[in-house]
Structure formats: C-alpha cells, structure tokens
Image: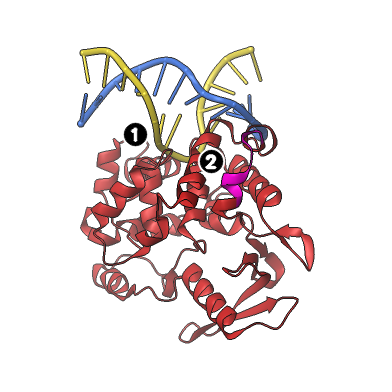
Chain colours: A red, B yellow, C blue
DNA sequence: GTCCAGGTCGCGC
DNA sequence: GCGCGACATGGA
C-alpha cells in the first residue's frame, strides 16, 4: 500500500508505467484534437536532470503541437516549480532525510486540473483498487482512442463526459454515488460556468483557491488539500486514513491523535507542510 | 453475511 | 462551529 501510494498518480489511467524501462507512457489529446502517444523517460544525472519525450503520431507534428506537448510534460513533471526554499529548510533543520536530493518532491500531476479533480474525487471513501477501476473505466469508455493502438485512450474531455448518458456512470463505469458529482462537474466546466484551469494562476491567494475547490460537489477537506498540493501549494495536508495511520505510528506511539494534533507536527514547515510529511512517509521503511 | 476504504454531504444542534 | 448517518461499490 505504501509503495502504491508513493507512486499513486502514476498508476491512474491513462498513465502507464513501464516498470523495466522506468518509462511513463500516456495517450494525450491535444487541443486541436490530435491524439498522440507520449513516452516520457528521465535522462541525465542528478545534477543535470533531463527528460526525453518520444511522441508517436500519424502525421508530422506542427511547431504549435510540439510546444503544447513540451508545456504539458513540463506541467505534469512540475519542471517549473522552485522548491529550493524547501530544500534549504531541510538542510537547516538537520532533519535526517539522507535520501533527500534535489529533484525529489515533484509529484506527478495530470495535464489538466479537470483531470486531477475527477481523479481526486474518485479516491474519496474508496480503496485504491476501486479508484483504479473507475478511472480506467472512464478512460476506456469515454476517452478518445489513440489511432496507432485503439485499445489505448486519452483521458476524456469535459465535453465527452458531459455528453455521456447518466447510465454510463451508473451501469458501465459504476461510479456509485460519485457519478452525479463527476457528471455535474463535467457539465459546469463544459458550460463555462466553472473555469478550473484558471486556478493554476500562481497569483491567486491560496485561501481563495481552496474556497473555489470546496465549492465543487464531492470536494471536501481532504480533496481540496490534495488538489492544492497538486497545484504546488503545500501548506495544507490531505488528512486521510493513510496520514492518520502513519502519524499514529510515527509520532504518537499508537495512540490516536486528533487530526489537529497530527497536522500540528508539521507546523514549523510553514508553506511546505505537505512535502515535509511526504518525505517523512517515504523515509519510513517499506512493509512487504 | 458484515465491515469499510486515501471522505463528503446534508442535516440538526 | 461540531456530531451524526447515509452514501454506491467492490474487496477483505
């Protein structure tokens, strides 16, 4: 479970991790409608990391398409995020994070916030296997196929998800009570009532972004904190069963702390609370 | 069968 | 603000 969690987003369709090659594959639908297959692989050293992106497409790519892919991959890997302040705090605190090296801490995210909101809602009150099943169902049934291998699909657009009949969610993908939440979200985004992607604006105040996220049906405290984390705002910790379990064991000798007490452990980390927790968790020896 | 998961909503207080 | 039951689904 811990291992799964540490690579969680990597496992959610249409992401596909090729284990023996340390490679991330993913079908991507470009804004113009072209559907391509990306193969993303790390390269270079720890000091000078680099990323190779292989693009598979029926036709030669235009410059605009190249730029879009470059921007998308950069967004997914958070190559533009500056974590140097967090690394500095780690050094200063003397925290025993021996394995922590520059470059860690860039948790994978999706090309769009829409996709991440959908996925986050599908993690709530659900075991990981259920999340995998539902996300795969959405991708397989509503995502556009990649022409080179029609078995593979992109993540569905809000339009495709809004246009799908309600039975698709209840009977085929079987989202349970989350179906109406997901459908309403897709409808509002499609109708232009809700501009999720504008929430990526770094100029917005975090409180403001949180408020907008909480206004989405199906997004509560945990989900909003998780989404803020995906947006590069680490001051809130998604308090879930995993967090509670870890904190109980790691800091409270098996006695259940309140959520408030547990979160307070990381108070000194200020706007980096989540990353502090994250590395704390990763440091913990793996179980089986 | 029963319990519950990487919670949230809609109540009533 | 806080406590509580309901909630679809599938896995343990």
Q: Residues within 10 Å of mark 1 (few under 14, many from 20)?
A: some
Q: Distance between the Cα atoms at labels 2 and 1?
A: 37 Å
Q: Nearer the viewer, mark 2 or mark 1?
A: 2
Q: Is residue A177 left or right of residue A141?
A: left
Q: Is residue A222 left or right of residue A69?
A: left
Q: Chain of mark 2?
A: A
Q: Chain of mark 1?
A: A
The residue that label 2 is drawn on is: A183
**Residue shown at the point (50%, 51%) measured from the top left:** A190
Q: Is residue A168 left or right of residue A115?
A: right
- Tell me the number on the disc at residue A256: 1
Against A198, residue A118 (above or below) is above
- Tell me the number on the disc at residue A48: none
Q: Which residues are magenta?
A: A160-167
Quadrant for residue A146, please give it.
bottom right
Q: Can residue A285 be seen in the rendering of this structure?
A: no
> Does label 1 lie on the same chain as label 2?
yes
Which residue occupies the extreme front position in the image?
A: A191
Q: Earlier in the sequence, mark 2 or mark 1?
A: 2
Magenta-span inclusion, residue A5: no
> Residue A168 location in percent, x, y?
66, 38
> Residue A114 location in percent, x, y?
48, 54
Q: Secondary structure at mark 2?
A: helix
Quadrant for residue A272, please give it.
bottom left
**Residue shown at the point (30%, 67%) measured from the top left:** A202
């Amino acid at each position: 479970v811990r291992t799964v969690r540490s690579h969680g987003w990597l496992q959610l369709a249409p992401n596909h991790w090729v284990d023996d090659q340390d490679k991330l594959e993913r079908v991507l639908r470009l804004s113009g409608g072209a559907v391509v297959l990306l193969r993303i692989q790390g390269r270079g050293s720890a000091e000078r990391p680099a990323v190779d992106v292989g693009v598979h497409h029926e036709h030669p790519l235009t410059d605009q398409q190249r730029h879009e892919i470059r921007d998308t991959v950069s967004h997914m890997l958070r190559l533009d995020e500056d974590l140097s302040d967090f690394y500095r705090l780690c050094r200063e605190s003397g925290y025993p994070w021996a394995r922590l090296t520059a470059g860690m801490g860039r948790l994978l995210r999706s090309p769009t916030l829409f996709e991440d909101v959908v996925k986050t809602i599908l993690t709530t009150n659900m075991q990981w296997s259920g999340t995998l099943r539902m996300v795969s169902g959405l991708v397989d049934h509503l995502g556009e196929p990649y022409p080179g291998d029609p078995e593979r699909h992109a993540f569905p657009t809000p339009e495709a998800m809004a246009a799908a009949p309600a039975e698709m969610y209840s009977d085929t993908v079987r989202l349970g009570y989350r179906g109406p939440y997901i459908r309403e979200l897709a409808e509002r985004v499609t109708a232009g009532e809700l501009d999720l992607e504008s929430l990526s604006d770094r100029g917005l105040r975090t409180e403001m972004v949180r408020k907008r996220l909480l206004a989405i049906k199906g997004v509560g405290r945990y989900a909003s904190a998780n989404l803020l984390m995906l947006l590069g705002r680490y001051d809130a910790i998604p308090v879930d069963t995993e967090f509670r379990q870890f904190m109980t064991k790691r800091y409270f000798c098996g006695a259940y702390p309140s959520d408030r007490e547990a979160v307070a452990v990381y108070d000194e980390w200020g706007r980096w609370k989540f990353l502090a927790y994250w590395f704390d968790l990763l440091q913990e020896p793996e179980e089986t």
